[in-house]
Image: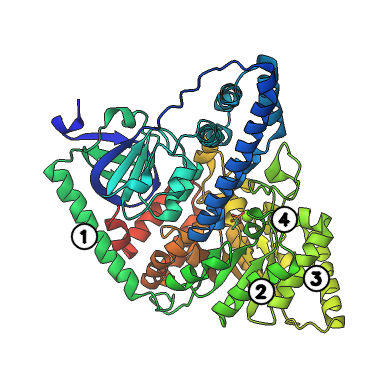
Amino acid sequence: MSAQTKGEKVFRGIAVSSGVCRGKILVLHRARHIVARRDLAEPEIAAETKRFEQVLVKTGQQIKEIQRRVVTNMSATEGDIFEAHLLMLEDRVLIEEVIRFILEHKTNADYAFHTVAERYVAALEQVDDEYLRERAADMRDLTGRVLDNLLEVKDAFHLSHLTEPCILVSHDLSPSTTAQLDKKFVLGFATDIGGKTSHTAIMARSLDIPAVVGLQNVAEELENGDYALLDGYNGTIIVNPTDQTLFEYGQLEKNKASLDEKLREILSQPAITLDGKPIRLSANIEDQHDVASVIAHGAEGVGLFRTEFLFINHESPPDEAAQYKAYREVAVALKPHHVIIRTLDLGGDKFVSNLQLAQEMNPFLGWRAIRFCLAQPQLFCAQLRAILRASAEGNVKMMYPMISGLDELNQANALVEKCKAELRIEKIPFDENLEVGVMIEIPSAALIADALAKRAKFFSIGSNDLIQYTLAADRTNEKVSHLYEPTHPAIIRLIKATIDAAHANGIWAGVCGEIAGDPVLVPLLIGLGVDELSAAPPVIPEVKYMIRRVKMSEAQALAEFALKCESPSEIYAHCLEVAKQTAPSLFESKV
Ligand code: PEP
Ligand code: MG
């Protein structure tokens, strides 16, 4: 029975992309492939294996085309999903297994591929690791595409045929389908399965489409044409909302519209506290295409350029010239504001197909970032030279990720000096005074911040990693997310010690981890003495709004409380209270 004949019904799931939308439901049911077994005569077998290989090539070309479109329209991160699809598609173990199946069972390629791929999907779905389980969705996505080509069927979704706005509801939404969503017609989406770290969720945030996942069996319960309201802040979809519900959400939308207006008004205003202390508000970017967003959201410059994303979507690592071009473009566009280029931070959860990083038992504790770069001086020096060259054209600074002690800093600096000497001989200009900073994201670095501060021009606190390493809680694992607490007293003390060591040695300290973009935590960070906050461009206006409404005296009182308090939840509660009192408008548009 349609939900239309019933009263209001609320489905609860996981909020993955904020915003509220309302409209008619469109339920997507991907047509199941009918894969029949067909026995082959001996002479047909060779042609069938050839057909299979040709379909793989065709599928690869289609994926690359979608990837190209996604990278152009969204960002390198989203395009990365298709890199995973291509890797699965080129997996020789899988391909050989399918060919063996065709040869041994003398059967058609569609049946062989379907059988083998289903085994892979089933195995991935059994794994006790959320990230890998979510890769089963990638595998299904890819399998569907290969089968479409083997069976010569068209994409059953026909999303390109949408003519009126709707809320998409589906059991699952593959990343490649999500990439094709047209914001004009897709107001939001809801799925039965999925988690916060799934690629589909990442894409929804990037597209700025409200989305809720993990709604269990919503695709079964809802029907085309049902009227619903989707709340991406709280993770609900409300079917047949009552007048009262619509009124409440209408109020929220008004609040959000008036907040947006307030945020627009301060776009070009400085990030300065109510009592006059300027806080540099910079943006985190992943490639040169993000510059427009930095400017549009009113950031002052770039506090973190995650250069590894230049490596992730390319067939081979970008050489010195390609990197120079990207760095220069950003530096010139944002001049006179600074652009802090972080040297490569590969490893951990950032995988790159073209640099054969071996699988590790504990990748976050392994061959990552500066450790990897110091062991690959050729690769590292190409980047250092590119950064140095770009420094001649704008206000470029450079920082090293994952410094754990003085030796790494000294070794990296020695390579910089070597590169500078080469450039001098080659008469290639660079900024002789290029400032080099250190990311503080390993507890050991925070504890020797005084020694590091004597050898660096600035600190940038990478709270994402500092929290995971201090609290031994994997930042990508939902099962330990309750332990991943930014307001844990240990974190607050480490941040304070880092900032104090910086100031005692005459250098500045910023924060570029996600906490810098959380308005609830901004007063605390300012109170702890931070000089720069760097966050994703879309959250910059809210952070600026908070900075402009807080007084240093209030922020310092909050920091003093946090430094004495022993309970993470009490500290957080106090931060929330202060944030709500300081900037109530930021909270009025969220339920
Ligand atoms: C951090 O660790 O806080 C940080 C900014 O770096 P990343 O998130 O790229 O590891
Ligand atoms: Mg980090």
In depth, the one of 525 and 63 nearer the eye is 63
Mark 1 / mark 4, whichever is N-terminal: 1
Q: Residue furthest left?
A: 243
Q: Point out the quarter of the image occupied by ligand 1.
A: bottom right
Q: Is residue 416 above or below residue 246?
A: below
Q: Residues within 10 Å of mark 2 (few under 14, many from 20)?
A: many
Residue located beneath label 2 in the image: 397
Q: Is any atom of residue 71 visible in this view? A: yes
Q: In the picture, residue 192 is in which quadrant? A: top left
Q: Residue furthest front?
A: 43
Residue located beneath label 4 in the image: 316
Q: Mark 2, mark 4: which one is toward the viewer? A: 4
Q: Residues within 10 Å of mark 1 (few under 14, many from 20)?
A: few
Q: Please, what is the three-letter code of the amino acid marked with disc 4?
A: Ser
Residue at x 23% of width, y 46% of height:
23
Can you give x and y, in whole percent of width and height, for residue 442 in the image? Answer: 67, 53
Question: Which quadrant holds the N terminus?
Answer: top left
Mark 3 / mark 2, whichever is N-terminal: 2
SS for callout 4: loop
Residue located beneath label 3 in the image: 416
Q: CA distance from mark 1 to mark 4?
A: 49 Å
Residue located beneath label 1 in the image: 254
Q: Indicate which disc residue 536 carries.
A: none
In depth, the one of 327 and 558 nearer the eye is 327
Q: CA distance from mark 4 to mark 3?
A: 24 Å
Q: Please, what is the three-letter code of the amino acid marked with disc 3?
A: Val
Residue at x 56% of width, y 22% of height:
111
Residue at x 65% of width, y 16% of height:
41
In depth, the one of 132 and 540 nearer the eye is 132
Q: CA distance from mark 3 to mark 2?
A: 13 Å
Mark 2 / mark 4, whichever is N-terminal: 4
